[in-house]
Image: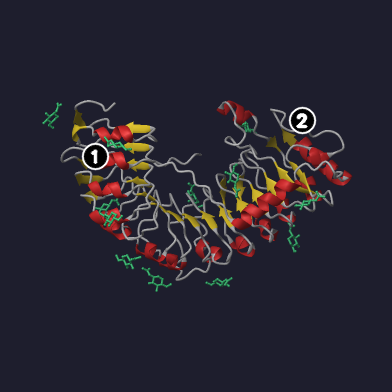
Amino acid sequence: MDRNTSFVVVLVHCYLSLATLFCMFAFARGNPNVLCREVEREALLRFKQGLIDRSNRLSSWIGEECCMWRGIGCDNITAHVIQLNLRNDPYADSFTTFEAFKSSKLGGVISDSLLELKHLHYLDLSGNNFTDAHIPRFFGGLQNLRYLNLSDAGFVGTIPHQLTNLSNLHSLDIGYLFVQVDNLEWLSHLSLLEFLDLSYVNLSKASNWLQVMNMLPSLSELHLSSCELNKYDPILYVNFSSLTMLDLSSNNFVYSTFNWMNSLTSLVTLDLSYNLIQIPLTVVHNMSCLRNLYLSRNNFSSTALNLFYNITTLERLDLASNNIRGVLPRALGSLSRLTHLDLSDNHLEGKIPRFLGNFSNLQLLDLYGNNLGGGTLPDELGKYQKLSVLSLYGNMLSGPIPMSIGNLSSLRTLDFYFNHLNGTIPT
Ligand SMILES: *[C@@H]1O[C@H](CO)[C@@H](O)[C@H](O)[C@H]1NC(C)=O
Ligand SMILES: *[C@@H]1O[C@H](CO)[C@@H](O)[C@H](O)[C@H]1NC(C)=O
Ligand SMILES: *[C@@H]1O[C@H](CO)[C@@H](O)[C@H](O)[C@H]1NC(C)=O
Ligand SMILES: *[C@@H]1O[C@H](CO)[C@@H](O)[C@H](O)[C@H]1NC(C)=O
Ligand SMILES: *[C@@H]1O[C@H](CO)[C@@H](O)[C@H](O)[C@H]1NC(C)=O
Ligand SMILES: *[C@@H]1O[C@H](CO)[C@@H](O)[C@H](O)[C@H]1NC(C)=O
Ligand SMILES: *[C@@H]1O[C@H](CO)[C@@H](O)[C@H](O)[C@H]1NC(C)=O
Ligand SMILES: *[C@@H]1O[C@H](CO)[C@@H](O)[C@H](O)[C@H]1NC(C)=O
Ligand SMILES: *[C@@H]1O[C@H](CO)[C@@H](O)[C@H](O)[C@H]1NC(C)=O
Ligand SMILES: *[C@@H]1O[C@H](CO)[C@@H](O)[C@H](O)[C@H]1NC(C)=O
Ligand SMILES: *[C@@H]1O[C@H](CO)[C@@H](O)[C@H](O)[C@H]1NC(C)=O
Ligand SMILES: *[C@@H]1O[C@H](CO)[C@@H](O)[C@H](O)[C@H]1NC(C)=O
């Protein structure tokens, strides 16, 4: 269920509180000085019995010292099992083939013997294959959990309300599952949540999703991509003002004032791509920390572009596949911190402007699929010492390729296909 974006950007957000949490568990992993507790070892073995483990990932789960087993972390003083990390991660585990990744997915039945792990803080079952199973209701009994990751683990059905008991959760990731909710009331009790990912969860029956999220004052990352959110109860104001990342992509928003976003003054990343938004997005002017703005595949017109030129904090601006016409406004030149500019698949005309030379940090410039032309390419293109991707294909550019291009020592992708360029290729 990979999301197909025209502009693949990998963002690493490191938040102090989450980072601390991860560090804590890193310390806990496999400490040879503590002895596993018998009752917890047996609980883990019963859990293992229910699993289908085709690639023998749990082969280390033998012997007395369960704190040394793969994926288990124990408290280094009390020896209680506090971490169970069975994530199947195609990136981290450096699988050589997709087949290898698939066959290392765990499946089967999740035993409620996990309830014996009364001190469990961290449970990660993401990337596995519990296909056709529901998210177990008994997870609600794992009341010490701070981190629960079931992303892409194959679960189906309705998310159990019992999760409401997990009031210590800081991170909840149940994205990329074929699950739905009948209502979201259970979520409002998880008041310590900082990270929430419900991407691909069908929330169409929870038109009060915004009211519910509003009960989560500590939220810093909220991912609600492809949740069928477009019909929602209006709200004037939200109080999760420490939000830094908001992803509402692929939700078929057509017309929305988004006025409630006025209070999101800490926002660093806003993703509204793959919607049908047409109206100017004035709320961005209150976001004084905004660095990443993803708006591809909407219906923004040139007016939208004029709205963004004074957000000088911007580093990544993606307006690919919209309805932007005419020449690139000069004022855009004030976005001097831009590293990624994607205006591909619009209706831009005229020359590639020289002011682009102001973007000395530019790493990606994608203008493919426009009507740019009107003479030769500017020499200024040679100024981008950091440029890695330059895509100008499918325009009406003519004349020679500037020699300065030869100075772009970081360049990895250069695409001039389908233009009217002539002359020689610079050495
Ligand atoms: C236990 O882990 C903590 C960090 O979580 C560390 O500060 C402490 O030194 C460790 N104690 C032992 C005995 O390893
Ligand atoms: C997932 O599990 C189902 C049955 O439980 C099986 O049919 C399917 O092949 C498995 N898929 C993968 C990728 O392991
Ligand atoms: C959950 O696991 C997936 C990988 O399976 C990872 O991409 C995602 O970032 C994790 N979520 C959290 C909150 O750490
Ligand atoms: C949730 O908590 C309530 C009250 O604290 C308790 O009665 C109930 O059994 C708990 N549910 C689960 C699934 O543990
Ligand atoms: C989402 O749920 C609604 C209401 O249950 C349903 O009508 C709709 O078809 C669902 N969407 C998808 C993609 O399954
Ligand atoms: C957030 O606002 C809602 C009403 O909009 C309110 O019910 C809730 O108590 C507020 N939460 C905090 C922590 O202020
Ligand atoms: C910014 O937010 C304030 C309230 O916090 C509001 O009065 C103002 O209209 C907002 N400005 C824009 C451009 O949305
Ligand atoms: C996009 O906006 C234009 C007007 O600016 C409108 O004519 C067109 O129908 C819109 N397209 C979609 C798909 O909504
Ligand atoms: C940017 O311009 C808009 C009007 O287009 C204005 O409301 C806003 O205050 C300006 N922001 C900054 C930071 O200058
Ligand atoms: C380019 O940057 C300079 C300052 O570095 C600024 O004076 C100039 O106005 C900018 N050009 C445009 C078109 O914004
Ligand atoms: C390439 O860069 C060097 C300095 O690094 C400069 O002297 C030279 O003029 C540049 N060449 C072109 C064609 O821009
Ligand atoms: C390149 O094309 C231009 C017209 O677009 C023409 O004037 C010029 O002579 C051509 N140069 C070469 C080397 O073919």
Q: Look at the numbered disc 1 and give the secondary structure of its residue.
A: helix
- Residue drawn 64% across the image and 33% down it: 105
Can the viewer see residue 10 in this picture?
yes
**Picture coordinates of residue 414, whole percent (x, y):** 33, 32
In the image: residue 367, left or right of residue 12: left
Please give the count of numbered marks on the rendered protein: 2
Front residue of 22/176: it is 22
Residue for badge 1: 379
- Labelled pair 1, 2 in contact (Cβ < 8 Å): no
Note whether 156 is above or below 311 in the view shown: above
Does the numbered disc 1 mark a residue whose Cβ is under 8 Å from ligand 11? yes
In the image, what residue type sits under mark 1?
Asp
Note whether 21 is above or below 407 in the view shown: below
Front residue of 11/353: it is 353
Q: Look at the numbered disc 2 and give the secondary structure of its residue.
A: loop
- Residue drawn 69% across the image and 40% down it: 86
- Residue drawn 27% across the image and 32% down it: 416
Q: Which mark is residue 254?
A: none
Q: Residues within 10 Å of mark 2 (few under 14, many from 20)?
A: few
Front residue of 75/262: it is 75
Note whether 99 is above or below 381 in the view shown: above
Mark 2 or mark 1, which is nearer the start of the sequence? Answer: 2
Q: For the C terminus, which image quadrant?
A: top left
Q: Which mark is residue 59?
A: 2
Q: CA distance from mark 1 to mark 2?
A: 60 Å
In the image, what residue type sits under mark 2?
Ser
- Residue drawn 47% across the image and 65% down it: 264
